[in-house]
Amino acid sequence: MADFLAEKLQEIDDRLKELRPLHEEFLKLEKAKQALAGMDSTPARRGPGRPRGSGATSSGNGRRRRRRGRSGGTAADKVLDVVRQNPGITVSEVGDRLGYTQKNYLYRVFHNLTEDGAVQKQGKGYSAS
């Protein structure tokens, strides 16, 4: 009986080895079909590294909507307060005052504030509009 089971297990293993490439091809074809079918219904595609829901959809006026922060205030609110108190302050100086050790994030905050018209570049620093 042990020989019979070992023989059947070997047959199953051999057949699985034969079918694996076909199964992998099947999965690739399914993905390709879904991608091609989805191209007609997807009006805009998001860019690499962009979160879901950030496709290139238009809100009409060309400006992006920004999410409101929690009750503690957003980084943009804190930055704007510091810039109002210290016109001409640089991004690095704002980071020092707010306690940011990694200041790269602040460049995005300043960019968004500049686009919104809340601050304007003044030489190397920024001032509130």
Image (cartoon, rainbow, N blue to C red):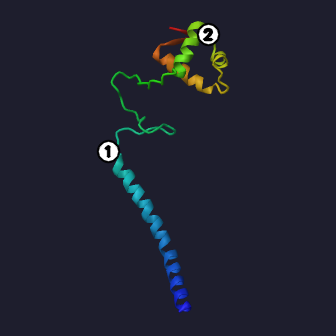
**Mark before the other along the chain sequence, 2 or 1:** 1
Residue positioned 63% across, 11% down in the render: 89
Could you say which quadrant of the image residue 75 lies in?
top right
Q: Amino acid at mark 2?
A: Gly
Question: Residue 123 — which label?
Answer: 2
Q: Along the horizontal axis of the image, is 58 left or right of 71?
A: left
Could you say which quadrant of the image residue 3 lies in?
bottom right
Q: Along the horizontal axis of the image, is 40 left or right of 87?
A: left
Image vertical order of residue 2 relative to residue 33, above or below: below
Cα separation between marks 2 and 1: 47 Å
Q: Which residue is mark 1?
A: 41
Residue positioned 62% across, 17% down in the render: 91
Q: How dense is the environment of label 1, judged by Cα within 10 Å: few (below 14), some, or many (20 and up)? A: few
Q: Secondary structure at mark 2?
A: loop
Residue positioned 59% across, 12% down in the render: 82
Q: Along the horizontal axis of the image, is 71 left or right of 104?
A: left
Question: Residue 28 — which label?
Answer: none
Residue positioned 52% across, 87% down in the render: 5
Specify whether residue 107 is in view. yes
Image position, residue 80 (x, y; %): 54, 14
